[in-house]
Image (tube, helix red, strand yellow):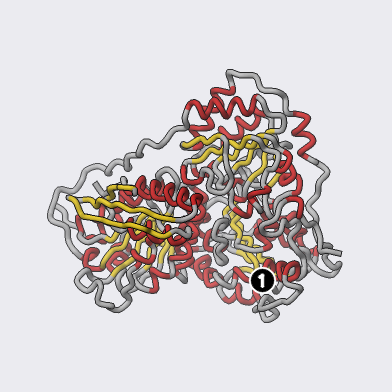
Amino acid sequence: MHTRTGAAIVLDTLESLGVETVFGYPGGAIMPLYDALYDHRIAHVLVRHEAAAVFAASGFARSTGRPGVCIATSGPGATNLITGIVDALMDNVPLIALTGQVRTTVMGTDAFQEVDVAAITHQVTKRNIVVRSIDQIEPALRAAFRLATGERPGPVLVDLPTDVLRAFEEARPQPETAIAAPAVREGPRADARALDAAVAALQSAQRPLLIVGGGTRWSGATEIFRALAAHIGAPVVSTLHGLGCAEPGDPGFLGMVGMHGWKRANLAVAKADVIFALGMRFDDRVTGDPTRFAPNAHTIVHADIDKSEFNKVVRAQVTLHGDLRETLVALDHRLARVTLPSFEAWREAACAPQEQLPRDDARHDHLSATDFLDALFAALPDDAIVATDVGQHQMWAAQRVRASHPQHFLTSGGLGSMGFGLPAAIGAQMAHPGRTVVAVVGDGGFQMSMAELATLRRHNLPVKIVLLDNRNLGMVRQWQELFYDGRYSATALPDNPEFTMLARAYGVEARLVDNANAIGAALERMLASDGPMLLHCACYPHENVWPIIPSGKSVDDLMEALPA
Amino acid sequence: MRSVTANDGRILARIIHLAHRFGCTYTSVASEHVGAAYRMEFAFAGPGDALRRLDAQITKLLDDDRETME
C-alpha cells in the first residue's frame, strides 16, 4: 500500500501527463510542493522572478507545442505571474500555472500572502481551478491540461492551498502503469459547403492571397500549409506568429504583413481579390484601419478553430470553423479534384524581388542594429531558435528572420510584453538542449529580465544574448519622433549599466560590438561558444523601423522614412 | 433573454465583465444552483456589433465549461 501527499500527487500527475521540466520560484504556501520536488524526477528551473517563470514556460511551450508549466507561491508570487498568463492567452500558448494558496481554513481572512488569484485571473485564463481537497488534485490537473491544449490553446491556473498539498491521501494500491493521456474532445470540423465555397472562390480568383497566422503553429499545420500553398501557387504573407510557416526560400513568400510588414506584403493585401486568412485573427497591427483593409477583396475566406473570431474585426464571406490542419487537409483533397487557374503572373508581380527593406543609414562610426541582425540571421543554423523581446529589435527581427519552422521564432505578439525574450529563450533551451537558442533583446526589455543571467549560469544554459542597445526605449522614441513632435518623454536611457561587466559579474561571457567591422568575429565567437554568452551591441540610437503604417491607417499611409 | 447551464457558476461574473468591456449593459440577470450546475438567464443591451461579439464569447466560455474534472 502506498500513500502520497497532495504535493506528490501533483508531481506524479504532471509526470504522467508528460511534464519533464517546470519553471518556478518557491515561497511559503507552495513549500510542500518544493519539498516534493527535492527528490522528484521532474526537473525544476529556478528563475529569479516569477515573471520569468511564466515566460520561460511560455518559451518552452512555443518551441515544442507542449504545455509549459510554471510554479509560484501565493500572494505576490501568484500576482507576478499575471502578465505572462495574459501573454499566453493573447498568443494562444498552452500554459499551466500552479500557485500556492493559504490554508483552506483561513482563505478569506486576509491571511499573510493571501490573494484571490482565482478572481484576479478569471478574465485572463481559459479556466482556473481552486483545489479544495486532495482528491481533486489529479482530476483538476488533468482537466487543466485538456483545457490548455484543447482547440484554441491557452493558460489554465490551478490554485493549490498549502494544507491540500500537505495532506495524505487515503491508502490505496499504487498504480502499476502510467495513467493514460487525457482524452481529446472531438473538435469542430469545417462545414462541407463552406469548404466547397472556399474552393469555388479560388477557382474564380484572379489575385488570390494566403495570409498565414499562428493557428498554423498550434494545430501542427505547417507541412500541409506548405503543400497547399505550393499547389495553389498564390503569393503568401504572414502575421507575426505565422513566421516560419512558409516554405523556406519560397519566392512566393512576401514576408510579414501589417504595421511593420514588408511593403510588397501590404500591397498584395490591398490588391488581392480573394484572401484566405488561415489561423489568424485580424489583429489591429495586421489590419490597420479595418474599413480600408483589403479593399479589392470580394471574398475573404477565414479558417479558424475559434468561432468567435469570425467577423469580429473583418467580415468574411466564407468561414471554415475547425482545426486548421484538418481544414487544410480537407481543402487539399478538394483542390486535388479541380483545376485552378494559373496565378503565376500575379504571384510574380506581387513578389517584387527587387524590394529592399527601407532603413536609416547609421553614421559610419556607429553600429546599425539592422546590419547586425542581417549578419546574425545569415550565420545561424537552420534549426536555431530565436526569441525576441518587444520593441524595435522585435520588428527588425520579424522583418528579417529566416525561420524554417514557426516554433523557431518566439515572440510576444498580442500582449507585447517587455521582459519576455530572455526567459522565453531559457524555456526553449531547456526544451532543446542541443540547439542554438538566441535571445534578441533591447536595452529596455533586457533590464526587465536581466536577473535571469543567474538562471543561465546556474543551469549552464548556452543561450546567446544579442543585446541591441540604442540607449533608448527605441520604439516609443520612434513614435515620439514621428507622432509627438519629437518630445522625448522618458525614453532616453543614457544611464544604462556597462552590460558586459554586468554579465561577467554573473559569470556569463560577454563581448562588446560597437562597429560594423567587429560583427563577423563577434558572431563567430558567440556561435562557437558552448556556454551562455552576451553580445552587447552598442547601436546607433536613432535608427527607426521602416516601413511603418501608422496606427489605424492603411497601406496608402505607409511611411518609409522620416518626413522631409 | 438567453438561458444557459454551466458547471462553473463564476461564468456569470465573467460574462458581466465582458459585457461591460464591450460597452453593453445587462438588463436582466438571474441564476440558480440546480443539482451540480448553475442555470442562468441573462439579457444585455448595447450596440448590435458588441452584442454579437458578446454572444460569441459566451458560447466560447460555455464550450470551455464543458471540460469538467469528471
Residue sitting at 50 percent across and 32 percent down? Answer: A327
Left or right of A419 in this view: B51:
left
Left or right of A187 in this view: A358:
right
Residue A146 in sight from this viewpoint: no
> Does A447 sit above or below residue A547?
below
Is B2 in front, or is A475?
B2
Residue sitting at 28 percent across and 78 percent down? Answer: A110
- Type of amino acid under label 1: Leu
Where does residue A295 sit, x and y in percent of width and height?
Answer: 69, 42
Residue A60 in sight from this viewpoint: yes
> Does A183 sit above or below residue A509?
above
Q: How many callouts does the rendering have?
A: 1
Left or right of A212 in this view: A193:
left
Residue sitting at 30 percent across and 52 percent down? Answer: B41
Classed neighbour count for the residue bearing mark 1: other residues with Cα under 10 Å, few (<14), some (14–19), many (≥20): many
Q: Secondary structure at mark 1?
A: loop
Where does residue B31 sit, x and y in percent of width and height?
Answer: 26, 56
Q: Which residue, given by chain and number where applicable, does mark 1 sit on?
A: A473
Is A461 in front, or is A301?
A301
